[in-house]
């Protein structure tokens, strides 16, 4: 019985201790893996941030250098002068951050080489400008090629880092999923083993109590027997006294009494012997009780050892609490970073009420935290833009993130400022959106810089257009006079000169229209227009300068529109020119025009290189050009599609593209029927 009790007790506490050790070890390893994965994800984010910073530095340097080349004013060189040191510092930081990644080290080395080449080209053109030397197209082409190479090298490093980030995020998600399941299963198993052991120990204790009660009953019976033996001894003593008295009186009968005494003594001896045997049995029972008491004492010692083990477990729990305290300290540091940010970081609930407000937001908008917390975000939005907020909240409720949304907001003193918003949904552990985090950056100065740039482009374009018009007229006069020249070279050269002046005039007109559009001075003068006739005229015009492509247009009947003929014609011309530029010679360019649901739908289809899906959303952005090996030698500034899209929108139409890489593209636009 004692052995079974001891075995059950030791097995129960042994299994419980083993499960505690296993759970603690696995928890430590899993938490360590989670922290390592989290640090790796943060590391990838820092590398990508440094890569973006490097491109930003080079763009600032290139902008300053271009401003100096165009104006000759040295104050434009301020961002350029510090670019070399800033770029070298950023590249060194990238090299340090990726020291454990051999492939990224190779990418950073390539970036460093291309970066130095680009800076040398920038410096060479600045030096030429300072010396008064002319800057030729070859210089600009070399600078562009170096900048494209830098973008490709940075994009390659970012792609590699993105792949690492995906792998690290996958590892982090795996550990985050497995860890709670394993810990809960281990705890349930430990509780089950502990409950089973407790049940066995309780059963053994109850059995031992039953045996103890039986022993106590046996002791009481032995005590009663001893009392009976004592009473018998007292009776024998009394009988001896009476016999002595009788012996005096019955001296004559001594022999008979002696015989009787011998017989009586024999009986007494037998009774005494039986009493001695009873005392030995009692002694044996006492020894068994003593052994049981010793076993109970050993059990108490084992329970004390178990209490000590529980005290050690308490120490481990204290360590876990210390780790939680460190996590809270890290959270406090994150709060400090948010508070020290120059950008406004604002939290709000799904009803649009502001829940958090940092110092950057206070600096931008003028409201203190106490003044704005609990108020609606509409406080910061001008009345004419308050219809933006419901749409933004609807997108965020669907889990969508909004990046670099440019709009206008209102400060406490009533000023209107340009801001760029990055808005992200806040989700709970179940993935449900519970709030919104918004980062607001004041871009008013950036907008003013853009306006100054647009003014400069408008002025430069206007100044260039006048001499270009004169040059075109002179070339046309020469064409008329030398039309019958015996040398074929002269008419061909003049034809090419006319073509180039037309292209230059188209580019300058594009820049002027962009400037007018952004300043609100692009006027749409609508008149009655036959769209079919206009398309035929544009095709004929393009054919004058293009001989290597075949244009197919099944002219429908008259489609009457109320539109600006010149500007809609520029849209069609731009789409036809793009179809020629971005498709091989000898290929078809198919134009279609039809009426669908009260709208005229025009499409221009080519069989060219096509566009990647990632580039399609940005094709109609200002100054955006697809960067690839096939397009870097094709001229253009990325304003044609932007201007075309704005013209179509101001006519109340839509414009879009369907494209497949390596197959071709089809551009569509619609216009309302008159």
Image: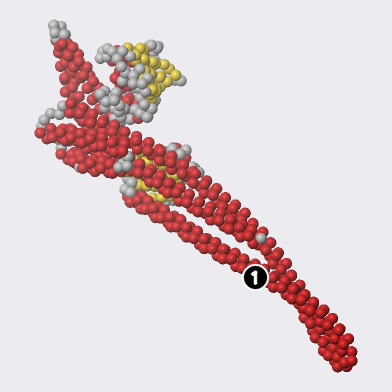
Q: In the image, is 166 to the left or to the right of 306?
A: left
Picture quadrant of residue 408: top left
Check the picture and name the quadrant holding the N terminus.
Answer: bottom right
Q: Looking at the picture, does residue 463 appear above or below residue 537?
A: below
Q: Looking at the picture, does residue 175 appear above or below residue 608?
A: below
Looking at this view, name the residue that lies furthest to the front: 255
Picture quadrant of residue 440: top left
Tell me the residue that label 1 is attached to.
Answer: 290
Percent across and percent down for residue 618 are 35, 30
Percent across and percent down for residue 198 are 62, 57
Residue at the image point whose x is 52% and y is 46% from the top: 181
Specify few, some or many for label 1: CA neighbours under 10 Å numbering under 14, 14-19, or 20 or more: few
Q: In the image, is 56 to the left or to the right of 596?
A: left
Looking at this view, name the residue that lies furthest to the left: 131
Q: Nearer the viewer, residue 195 or 248?
A: 248
Looking at this view, name the residue that lies furthest to the bottom: 248
Percent across and percent down for residue 430 are 50, 44
Residue at the image point whose x is 86% and y is 93% from the top: 248
Q: Is residue 161 visible?
A: yes
Q: Secondary structure at mark 1?
A: helix
Residue at the image point whose x is 40% and y is 19% from the top: 601
Q: Nearer the viewer, residue 474 or 134?
A: 134
Q: In the image, is 479 to the left or to the right of 236?
A: left
Picture quadrant of residue 244: bottom right
Q: Is residue 562 visible?
A: no
Q: Nearer the viewer, residue 17 or 131?
A: 17
Q: In the image, is 662 to the left or to the right of 427?
A: left
Check the picture and name the quadrant holding the C terminus.
Answer: top left
Percent across and percent down for residue 673 are 41, 20
Residue at the image point whose x is 23% and y is 20% from the top: 503
Q: Nearer the viewer, residue 585 or 643?
A: 585
């Amino acid at each position: 019985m004692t052995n079974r009790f001891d075995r059950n007790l030791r097995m129960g506490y042994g299994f419980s201790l083993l499960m505690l050790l296993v759970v603690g070890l696995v928890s430590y390893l899993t938490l360590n893996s989670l922290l390592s994965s989290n640090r790796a994800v943060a590391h990838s984010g820092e590398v990508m941030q440094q890569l973006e910073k490097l491109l930003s530095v080079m763009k600032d340097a290139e902008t300053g250098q271009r401003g100096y080349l165009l104006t000759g004013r040295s104050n434009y060189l301020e961002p350029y002068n510090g670019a070399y040191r800033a770029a070298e510092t950023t590249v060194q930081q990238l090299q340090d951050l990726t020291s454990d990644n051999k492939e990224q080290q190779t990418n950073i080395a390539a970036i460093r080489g291309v970066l130095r080449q680009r800076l040398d080209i920038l410096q060479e053109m600045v030096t030429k400008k300072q010396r008064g030397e002319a800057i030729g197209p070859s210089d600009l082409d070399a600078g562009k090629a170096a900048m494209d190479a830098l973008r490709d090298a940075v994009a390659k490093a970012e792609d590699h880092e993105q792949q690492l980030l995906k792998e690290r995020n996958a590892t982090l998600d795996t550990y985050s999923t497995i860890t709670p399941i394993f810990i809960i299963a281990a705890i349930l198993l430990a509780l089950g083993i502990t409950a089973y052991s407790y049940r066995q120990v309780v059963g053994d204790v109850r059995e031992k109590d039953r045996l103890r009660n039986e022993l106590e009953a046996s002791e009481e019976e032995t005590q009663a027997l001893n009392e009976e033996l004592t009473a018998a001894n007292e009776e024998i003593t009394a009988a001896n006294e009476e016999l002595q008295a009788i012996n005096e009186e019955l001296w004559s009968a001594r022999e008979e009494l002696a015989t009787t005494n011998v017989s009586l003594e024999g009986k007494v001896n037998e009774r005494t012997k039986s009493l001695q045997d009873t005392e030995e049995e009692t002694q044996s029972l006492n020894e068994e009780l003593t052994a049981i008491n010793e076993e109970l004492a050993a059990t108490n010692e084992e329970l004390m050892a178990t209490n000590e083990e529980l005290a050690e477990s308490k120490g481990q729990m204290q360590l876990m609490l210390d780790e939680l305290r460190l996590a809270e300290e890290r959270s406090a540091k994150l709060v400090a970073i948010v508070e020290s940010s120059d950008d406004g970081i604002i939290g709000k609930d799904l009803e649009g009420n502001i829940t958090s407000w940092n110092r950057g937001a206070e600096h931008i908008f003028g409201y203190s935290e106490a003044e704005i917390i609990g108020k609606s975000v509409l406080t910061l939005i001008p009345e004419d833009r308050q219809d933006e907020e419901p749409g933004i909240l609807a997108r965020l409720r669907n889990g969508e993130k909004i990046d670099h949304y440019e709009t206008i907001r209102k400060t406490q003193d009533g000023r209107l400022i340009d801001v760029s918003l990055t808005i992200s949904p806040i989700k709970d552990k179940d993935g449900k959106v519970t709030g919104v985090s918004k980062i607001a950056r004041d871009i008013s100065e950036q907008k003013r810089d853009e306006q100054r740039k647009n003014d400069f482009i408008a002025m430069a374009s206007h100044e260039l257009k006048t001499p270009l018009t004169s040059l075109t007229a002179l070339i046309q006069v020469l064409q008329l006079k030398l039309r019958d020249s015996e040398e074929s070279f002269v008419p061909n050269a003049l034809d090419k000169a006319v073509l180039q002046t037309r292209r230059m005039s188209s580019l300058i007109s594009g820049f002027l229209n962009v400037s007018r559009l952004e300043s609100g001075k692009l006027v749409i003068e609508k008149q009655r227009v036959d769209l079919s006739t206009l398309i035929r005229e544009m095709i004929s015009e393009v054919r004058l300068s293009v001989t290597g492509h075949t244009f197919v247009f099944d002219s429908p009947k008259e489609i009457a529109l109320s539109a600006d003929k010149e500007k809609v014609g520029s849209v069609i011309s731009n789409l036809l020119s793009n179809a020629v530029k971005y498709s091989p010679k000898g290929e078809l360019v198919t134009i279609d025009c039809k009426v669908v649901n009260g709208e005229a739908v025009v499409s221009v289809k080519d069989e060219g290189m096509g566009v990647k899906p990632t580039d399609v959303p940005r094709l109609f952005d200002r100054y955006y050009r697809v960067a690839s090996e096939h397009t870097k030698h094709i001229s253009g500034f990325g304003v044609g599609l932007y201007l075309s899209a704005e013209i179509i929108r101001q006519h109340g139409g839509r414009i879009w593209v369907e494209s497949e890489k390596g197959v071709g593209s089809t551009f569509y636009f619609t216009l309302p029927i008159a």
